[in-house]
Amino acid sequence: MKKSILSISILMLFCAFYGCKPKVIAKEEKKQFCLSDTMQSMIKIDSVRYEPINDELHLSGEVAFDENKIVKVFPNSSGQVLEVKVSFGDKVTAGQVLAVMKSADVAGNYNDLVSAEADLRVAKRQMDNQESLYKNGISSQKEYEEAKGNYEKAEAVKNKIESLIKINGGGNTQPGGIYYIKSPINGYIVEKKVNAGNFIRMDMSDNMFTISDLKDVWIWANVFETDIAKVKEGYTAKVTTLSYPDKIYAGVVDKISTVLDPTNKVLRVRVRLLNPDMTLKPEMFANIIITNTENRKAIAIPSTAIVEENGKTYVVVYNGNCDLKVMEVSILKIVGDKTYLNSGVQPGQKLLTHNALMIYDEFTDNQ
């Protein structure tokens, strides 16, 4: 009994000295996350939209001439090339001399013209004499009419030879058979098939030069059978080349072949491009991305808004600098810089589209 009283007394003294009140643990409240001024300057905000679904088809092809804007230069007379004044790739202007030829045909035409002019002068004198004699009653009308007919024949022969000279080069030719091959347009020499010393015959079907202005070019792309239904005239196209991989040329599909290439079993699709800086050259290899719009629509957001973590995809919804929300989304497809969603956000909501990952990390660390 005495021991029990002693134990109770000791316990009471211990409680009086150290305190026996129950311990209360204060729960620390977390502060609301807000974007700092620095963060606000580092982000971009864009809206969720409901848009037609775009699709991209990646093709290979090559740069070619715009065949509506090229001129193939042929000679009008046979002869030997004395001099070639241009090289492949040279810029030329309309009327510039490309080559000099010596043509026996041209020389013969000029010789015939000299002879015809002499005959015409003789016929003119005879007609004038017969006209004078006829008026004075010395010769008959028949004699005058015959002289007049001879003059008209001589004039017709001269006119025929002059027309022939004009057809065979006209002002580009000179007596002696010199024949100047001149450029009919402004442009560039994109094909050169002659050199000094070559003999050109009229029965040869080949041209001497090809000239193009290159301000417009064609891109021929190859489409495999499985992708034919994905390409239509009017679809937009983006073209890049090995020479300028960072430069994108924008064009439009303006023609689709009606038959497959028998060798490669591909359909040829033509894209027309403007080429103002002349960087696109014929025969260049090209990569083509053709974009088409499907009939259905979906929720679309910039691809830069996407944040991936642990196999899931999120976006940061922005309602205000102190009102952010992380939402999980389901991706339908990604086309270029645009991502189409099955679910997760609604049209009209605003998302962080620049430095979204940084804000996502800061936001989730404070939750």
Image (tube, rainbow, N blue to C red):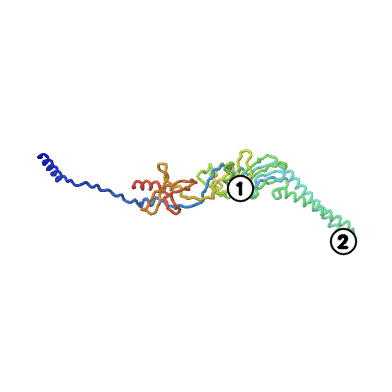
Please give the residue where the numbered disc 1 appears in the rendered image.
Answer: 255
Please give the residue where the numbered disc 2 appears in the rendered image.
Answer: 135
- Mark 1 Cα-neighbour bin, 10 Å: few <14, some 14–19, many ≥20: some
Q: Name the element at disc 2.
A: helix
User: What's the distance in space between the residues labelled 1 and 2, CA to CA?
Assistant: 74 Å
Residue name at image x 13 percent, y 42 percent? 8
Q: Is residue 284 visible?
A: no
Pick the quarter of the image with the N terminus. Answer: top left
Left or right position of 98 against 242 = right
Query: Can you give x and y, in whole percent of width and height, for residue 324 in the image?
Result: 38, 51
Residue at the far top in the pictured view: 263
Q: Amino acid at mark 1?
A: Lys
Whether pointer 1 and pointer 2 mark residues with C-beta atoms closer than 8 Å, the reply is: no
Q: Name the element at disc 1.
A: strand
Residue name at image x 64 percent, y 39 percent? 262
Residue nearest the observer in this picture, 292 or 246: 292
Q: Amino acid at mark 2?
A: Lys
Query: Can you give x and y, in whole percent of width and height, for residue 302 in the image?
Result: 46, 49
Residue nearest the observer in this picture, 308 or 115: 308
- Mark 2 Cα-neighbour bin, 10 Å: few <14, some 14–19, many ≥20: few
Residue name at image x 89 percent, y 57 percent? 142
Query: Can you give x and y, in whole percent of width and height, for residue 150 in the image?
Result: 84, 53
Q: Is residue 196 visible?
A: yes
Q: Number of labelled discs?
A: 2
Image-quadrant location for residue 205 = top right
Left or right position of 283 against 155 = left
Query: Can you give x and y, in whole percent of width and height, for residue 110 in the image?
Result: 75, 48
Residue nearest the observer in this picture, 41 or 172: 41
